[in-house]
């Protein structure tokens, strides 16, 4: 579902700065085994200096990916075009998260992209990871990560990652922003366990 917010936004700039300041991040997906080509990446010097020689599937560094529960949610950014999706459990969802529900919002606006997720049915006080993905949920559970530049690094800010932690009730709401507005190739958002395989357990189509 696509909607357009009617008024201009004043707070998106602050939200974008949160992400732009931290360019390093992990990748939790199985498609992240290839070495990162930093030379083809973005101009952010902290990314280029990371010397990241490729992911081994998972680590616990969330720089550039940690959501901000207090940021202006994507659904409330003035002047934004907002796509909305509903989280459904994947067949691979293990016990504990097999009844996960929720909503994802993908907003495009003058300052870039903002993603907000609202999730219920998680395990209490548990950390998870999510990303924008390049395929619909019905195709290979969302397929590989969405990348703004498909020859760029497999990490933020070239990808959109959202680390989040469920509260005692097993719910989580958080927001991440990116200064690139071109999310045309982002078809879904996938939720992952923080296990060594980054197991996909839920997906929402945009
Ligand atoms: Cu993912």
Image (tube, helix red, strand yellow):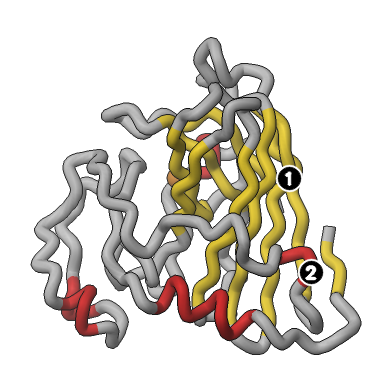
Q: Position of residue 185 (x, y in %)?
A: 56, 65
Q: Is residue 96 left or right of residue 116?
A: left
Q: Is residue 107 above or below residue 59?
A: below
Q: Which residue is mark 1?
A: 103
Viewer-nearest residue: 127 or 112: 127
Query: Closest to the observer: 167 or 51?
Result: 167
Residue bearing mark 2: 76
Q: Quadrant of ligand 1?
A: top left
Report if residue 182 is visible in the image. no
Tell me the SS state at disc 1: strand
Left or right position of 97 against 125 = right
Question: At which x and y percent is residue 65?
Answer: 41, 58
Total number of numbered labels? 2
How would you rate the neighbour count of disc 1 (Cα within 10 Å): few for under 14, some for 14-19, many for 20 or more? some
* Residue 60 against residue 91 in the figure, above or below: below
Considering every residue shown, the one lying at the far top of the view is 95
Q: Residue at x 32, y 60 (%)?
A: 63
Q: Is residue 179 above or below residue 74?
A: below
| 76 left or right, relative to 41 | right
Percent x, y for residue 58?
25, 40
Say whether disc 2 or disc 1 marks the residue closer to the N-terminus.
Answer: 2
**Spatial separation of the CA atoms under disc 2 and disc 1:** 14 Å
């Amino acid at each position: 579902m696509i909607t357009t917010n009617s008024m201009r936004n004043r707070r998106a700039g602050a939200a974008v700065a949160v992400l732009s300041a931290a360019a390093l991040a992990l990748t939790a997906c199985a498609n992240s085994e290839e070495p990162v080509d930093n030379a083809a990446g973005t101009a952010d010097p902290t990314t280029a200096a990371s010397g990241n020689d490729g992911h081994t599937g998972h680590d616990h560094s969330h720089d550039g990916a940690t959501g901000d529960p207090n940021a202006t949610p994507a659904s409330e950014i003035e002047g934004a075009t907002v796509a909305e999706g509903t989280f459904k459990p994947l067949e691979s969802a293990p016990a504990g998260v097999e009844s996960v529900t929720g909503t994802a919002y993908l907003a495009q606006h003058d300052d870039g992209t903002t993603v907000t997720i609202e999730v219920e049915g998680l395990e209490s006080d548990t950390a998870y990871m999510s990303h924008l993905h390049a395929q619909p949920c019905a195709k290979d559970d969302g397929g590989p990560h969405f990348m703004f530049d498909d020859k760029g690094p497999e990490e933020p800010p070239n990808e959109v990652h959202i680390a989040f932690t469920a509260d005692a009730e097993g719910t989580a709401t958080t927001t991440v922003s990116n200064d690139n507005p071109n999310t045309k190739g982002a078809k879904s958002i996938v939720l992952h366990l923080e296990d060594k395989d980054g197991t996909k357990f839920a997906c929402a189509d945009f």
